[in-house]
Image (cartoon, rainbow, N blue to C red):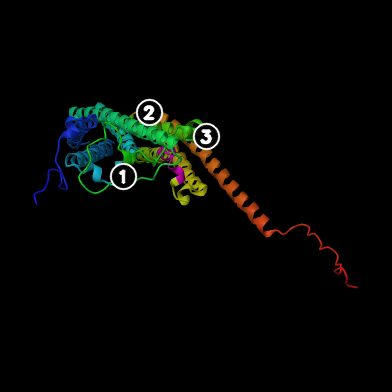
Amino acid sequence: MAAEPGDGLIKFSLDFITKTTLGKLKAAELVFTLLAGACGISVLSYRDCNCSSKVGFFDFVAWTAFINALIDMVIHLIGLWERLYWIFRHPAIFFVLCLLADVGFLIGSSLVASCSAYRCVTNPKTAAAAAFFGFVCLVLFAFETYLNLKIYRGMEEEARQQSSGQNKGPDFVEPPIGPPPPYARSGGVSDNMAEQPLVHFSLDFITKTWLGRLKAAELLFTFLTAAIGDFGISWAWYGCGAKVSFLTWIAWIAFINALIDMIIHLMGLWERLYWFFRHPAILCALCGLAVIGFLIGSCLMASCAKYDHVSDKNAAGASAFFGFVCLALFSIETYIHFKIYRGIQEEAGNQHTEQSKGADFTEPPPPYSPPSGVV
């Protein structure tokens, strides 16, 4: 029996590129991430400069984004998008991935641009071109972040309208195996993805909680500490290269952790985490390590700025100052988590006391009276 068109496992079509805005955007991302990675890999750093790790970070971001965009493009072109498990097609996942790409290209492109400005690489023009293509990728992924957020908000609105007509909508239904339905990612949301959303985007964590405001401040000042330390200091001597790298490493690690924590809260996934990862004792220990790291790193950076052992002591001083600000912020968060932990312990102690403690007074039984008719 002859197979009908479209009955095969895959079906190659260019409709994703020719008929959807998201496909055209993905094609542009493929081109510019390839150009950014190709230019970045051609840049070599001088031995005495601190640009080798900066260029390496940019290359990692560019090639990772290129590979992800290529996989996404291939899946769409051969018609396998609708056959993926629903979690891999959820716009919230793509929103987070594009947001990480935005942050990566922002940091990496700025790092490479700083190296080209300070003549610390073999070919400054190639480094400048790599930084330019990186900033173009930043714009493209920012636009895709907006598109995925718009699709997600449309899903939420559709699910809200459905739930208003009935008490509760059905859970997610896995699409049947067979010829994929018409492509509908850019034009709308398929019916089976408009059910109960996996995540719920909300700014309440920042606008209504002190911990959210504190986390937003940590994001800002950790980025400033690391960015100024990396961008403003290209030369270091008398042992200050390791000191500068230590503070910037601490700052980038703290920034990435704060960013992940912020995304989890904003997407409404915090309560879905296993209890161990939400325990205040764990968070208190992590913030305590950040406090120690920023204390040591900021003091080391300040000593290098004081003795003029770096190419720009003003940048080193500013990085050390923002490092001390981060020290204060993480100290406050450490205290908050410690206070929450003590509250949990106290509540558990009160419950244990109430369960183990007997009644203060027991009502005595009534006096015995013989049944009527009995003498």
Asked whether 244 or 84 is in front, the reply is: 84
Q: Earlier in the sequence, mark 2 or mark 3?
A: 3
> Where is residue 54, by image quadrant?
top left
Magenta extent: 262-271
Residue 197 percent location from the top left of the image: 39, 40
The amino acid type found where label 1 is placed reads: Trp
Determine whether label 2 and label 1 are within 8 Å by CB.
no
Q: Is residue 305 visible?
A: no
- Give 133 or 117, whichever is nearer the viewer: 133
Which is more N-terminal, label 1 or label 3? 1
Q: Amino acid at mark 3?
A: Thr
Indicate the quadrant where residue 79 lies.
top left
Determine the residue located farthest toward the front in the rendered image. 373
Question: Circle 2 sits on which residue?
Answer: 315
In this rendering, which labeled residue sits more in front, label 2 or label 3? 3
Q: Secondary structure at mark 2?
A: helix
Asked if the stretch drawn in magenta spans residue 269, the answer is: yes
Q: Residues within 10 Å of mark 2 (few under 14, many from 20)?
A: many
Q: Is the residue marked by circle 3 packed among few (<14), some (14-19), or many (20+) residues within 10 Å?
A: few
Mark nearer the viewer, 3 or 1: 1
Q: Residue at x 9, y 52 (%)?
A: 1
User: Which label's residue is closer to the chain start, 2 or 1?
Assistant: 1
In reply to whether residue 252 is colored magenta, the answer given is no
The reply to whether callout 3 and callout 1 are in contact (CB within 8 Å) is no
Does the magenta stretch mainly form a helix, a strand or a loop?
helix
Query: Residue 370 in the image: x percent, y percent?
Result: 86, 69
Which dot marks residue 209? 3
